[in-house]
Image (spheres, rainbow, N blue to C red):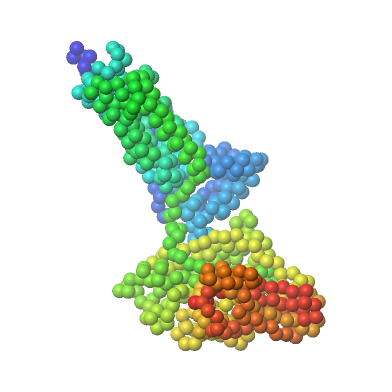
Amino acid sequence: MVLKKILTVVLISLLADPLIGLASEKRLFRRPVYLSLTLEEIFSDTVSLEDHYLSQLKAASDSVFKTEFEAEFLLILNARQKQYYQSLSTLQEKKDFIVQYWRAYNPNPLLPQNDRLLDHIRRSAYARSNFPSPDPPYIDDRGKYYIKYGKPTARYVDPGGIRRVALFSPGIFEQIEDYYTMGTAPLQMYSVPANESWGYENVSRNFVVHFVWKGQSFEEIESLSEIIRSRRRANLAWQWSDLIKRRASVSPILAEAAANIESFEVELMHMAYSGGTGFRGETVSTGTAHDKIIQRLKKSDEEILNFKKLAPATSYDPIHAVNKLMFSRVISQFRDRDNRTRVSVQFLAPLEKNLIRHINEEEQDTLVLEFGGMLRNHVFMPLDTARSSVTIPLRSLTAVPMNYLTGMIQLTAPARKTELTLQVRDLNNNTLGFKKEVLRLRKFSQSKLEMSDIQFYLMPEKEVERRLFPTVSINGLDLIPYPSIAIDRSRPLYCYFEIYNLQSSGIEHSYEITYKVASDKASRTIFQKISRMFKSPKDVSISLKHAQPVDEDTARELIALDLGQLSPGNYTLEITVSDATRPEHTVSQSRMLLIQ
């Protein structure tokens, strides 16, 4: 009898923590070195991980490529990307695809590091060290999810073994046992292998994945019912419910399932104690009660599976490129030399919303902003990069009413479809704001009448304005980019644009320029809309026309508009250039005006 008890204790202790027996096995096939770097080197700042990864990729043989790069890279591709990648026939084509992928998904290429690639390298190294498998890519299914989505927001680790169903305390179990016919009551105890449940609320509110230990590594399973070793029908509902309730904190969907099951169990217990036969208005036997619990559990599994199907292929944790600063931008395109296009970008960074609040007046007396931009081509190689900075003494913020800090940069590239990245950096606090967008650079023909976009400027009235804003010399005047989204009616608005191909398009003597400022129908009051419903969508508030002689093939035009007579609201400025002798030979550009 004593020997039997000793053996029972030993057996239970082994079953209770099967990972004890796995520790030595894990060490046998752990691969702590990834891309020829140790885990310590990868998580330190002593190695340029991006350069190292790309150089190792370039030099990788076919076998090294498959185990060190391809297997883990395929995990993060969506179905369309994976299909295209697998259609590539040569090793070099696949390497080029990987390089272009990391360029494309760089959240901010103006920074010296690619956060998305850094995150991937560190996830892969961590996964190999902590979630190992003996076979390529040397990670188990937990490691695959770690590479795809990073660290779970919630993780439940069950070492497995024998345990009692939490609901079945001795007193309660006696009542439940009486409710069943002889020999059909569920078992109080059950056993499960080592298992884990991960929740990713950062990916989806109800994204949950389960894993179970199978032989040499953890494998993904769709339902916790798969890990219950007893398949007896009377046991399944209670044991499955017990597993769900133990990990209710992993995800809202599991918490809801646990609460639903618990309320059902409470009513079932009440029926067992009272000896009643009714349950929620129904006649319930032990068999139908089990069925109802299992139906709820299966519904929870189905919902989890649906959320997993809708999840993105991957998500990353930003390391440096955290987008915190707000800014707006105005982009204008002009013709440059050698058939290139010049992109002029005006930045407007709100002072009150995201800059002043970060100022520590005891430690700094200036506000320093850096503005940056980059154009990249279809394979995400840089075409041009530009940066500028502005330093503002804090005392100047009270000397001149300012809502925005303004910056300007210029980029040039051949006319084509490009990707434009813009960045604002607060150098005092090292905070960032950045945006990416597709920009098609216009091709200004050599034989067709063309216009650039329209830029807005302001004449500085005080010397302090010249110091605070970038100054541009246009047609002999020193101007500053308009330092606000809204237009101040009390000061003239300077509009600048360029006209191309005047002579080469066939205009011989003169051309006409027409300026129209029209009120926007959408900005009117209800009364105004009713009273003018039969009129044109826009009412012309200002209309000017003047003729200019053709002296050169390109004209640089600057005009000051007095908007003092306009009421506050939304307007459209339209500028039209036409041949004085052929009115049908025209080109026009427009820009919105918000009059404050």
- In this rendering, is residue 516 above or below 259? below
Q: Residue at x 35, y 71 (%)?
A: 359
One can see residue 200 in this view? yes
**Can I make out residue 173 in this image?**
no
How many badges with numbers are in the image? 0
Q: Position of residue 407 (x, y in %)?
A: 51, 74
Relative image position of residue 252 (x, y in whole percent): 37, 41
Picture quadrant of residue 236? top left
* 357 lies left or right of 167: right
Q: Residue at x 33, y 20 (%)?
A: 286
- Seen at 60% across and 84% down, the residue is 560
Q: Is residue 164 left or right of residue 208?
A: left
Indicate whether 82 appears above or below 194. below
Residue 504 point in image, percent of width and height = 79, 76
Q: Quadrant of the N terminus?
A: top left
Give the residue at x 78% y 74%.
584
Whether residue 227 sits left or right of residue 93 in the image: it is left
Q: x%, y% of residue 284? A: 34, 22
Closer to us: 124 or 176: 176
Q: Residue furthest front?
A: 531
